[in-house]
Amino acid sequence: MNLFQILAICGMLSPILYTVMWILGGVLGSDYSHVRDDISSLFAVGAPRKRLFNAFIIVSSILLFIFYLGLHWGMTSGHGSFVGPFMFIVSGFMGVLVALFFPLDVGGEIITYRGKMHLGLVVLSGFLNIVGMVALWFRLSMVSVWSDFALFSLVSAIVSLVLVVVSLVFIKSKYRGLVERFMVTPYQLYYFMISLMVFLTN
């Protein structure tokens, strides 16, 4: 097993841990609702079992960031534009910042500077990921072994953008938890699939 395959395993583990985290949140928290409550509420200030879910989100974010650091060289031996991988690196770094320093306020609210930074960084990170998906579509569409993934990348970008806009509309509704789960799914699938492709092509 080479370095890029090890990094790819990190990338595949990240969305798995993230998904297990919010599912576990619903199992352990009798007052936590997947329909009403967003995922970030699990590790908000004063949240029950905050340490447990902090550990999940920190490890998940760091694993994905580590994978991103080798992404450019793990695809097509480093040939092609660095724009896509760079967008993912910056986005991954923001994810680590959110996990370590910017939880939501008590009750999952967005009131203080810290809570507003959480929302801002999460939204910006999501848009950077979408830009990265589009950039990788350009980079990989003419590479035979990656061409199918390139199309998947474009479709993921479009679906993610639509769902981000929808989730912003519902951000203060009683359905924001459910909408957010639909919104994060294309991202998590994308992280797993690009990691799997790097693993298989190296």
Image (cartoon, rainbow, N blue to C red):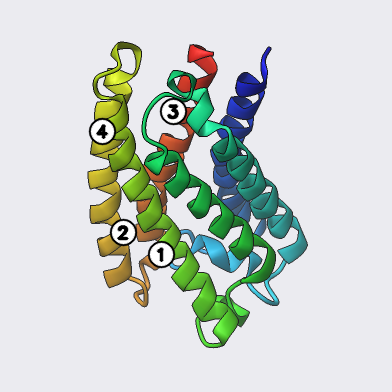
Q: For the residues marked 1 and 4, what is the alpha-carbon distance in whole angstroms?
A: 23 Å
Residue that numbered label 3 is attached to:
193
The reply to whether residue 107 is visible in this rendering is: yes
Q: Point out the tag, 4 or 2, that comes first from the N-terminus.
A: 4
Could you tell me the amino acid type at mark 3?
A: Met
Q: For the residues marked 3 and 2, what is the alpha-carbon distance in whole angstroms?
A: 20 Å
Residue that numbered label 1 is attached to:
123
Q: Quadrant of residue 174?
A: bottom left
- Whole-percent x, y for residue 45 in the image: 67, 76
Residue that numbered label 4 is attached to:
138
- Whole-percent x, y for residue 145 in the image: 34, 12
Q: Point out the tag, 2 or 1, that comes first from the N-terminus.
A: 1
Q: Point out the tag, 3 or 4, that comes first from the N-terminus.
A: 4
Helix, strand or loop for disc 4: helix
The residue located at (29%, 27%) in the rendering is: 150
| Dot 2 and dot 1 residues touching (CB under 8 Å) | yes
Q: Point out the tag, 1 or 4, that comes first from the N-terminus.
A: 1
Helix, strand or loop for disc 2: helix
- Whole-percent x, y for residue 86 in the image: 46, 45
Residue that numbered label 2 is attached to:
164
Helix, strand or loop for disc 1: helix
Q: Point out the tag, 1 or 3, that comes first from the N-terminus.
A: 1
The residue located at (43%, 48%) in the rendering is: 87
Could you tell me the amino acid type at mark 4?
A: Phe
Q: How many other residues sit within 10 Å of disc 1, few (<14), some (14-19) or many (≥20)?
A: some
Q: Nearer the viewer, mark 2 or mark 1?
A: 1
Q: Nearer the viewer, mark 4 or mark 2?
A: 4
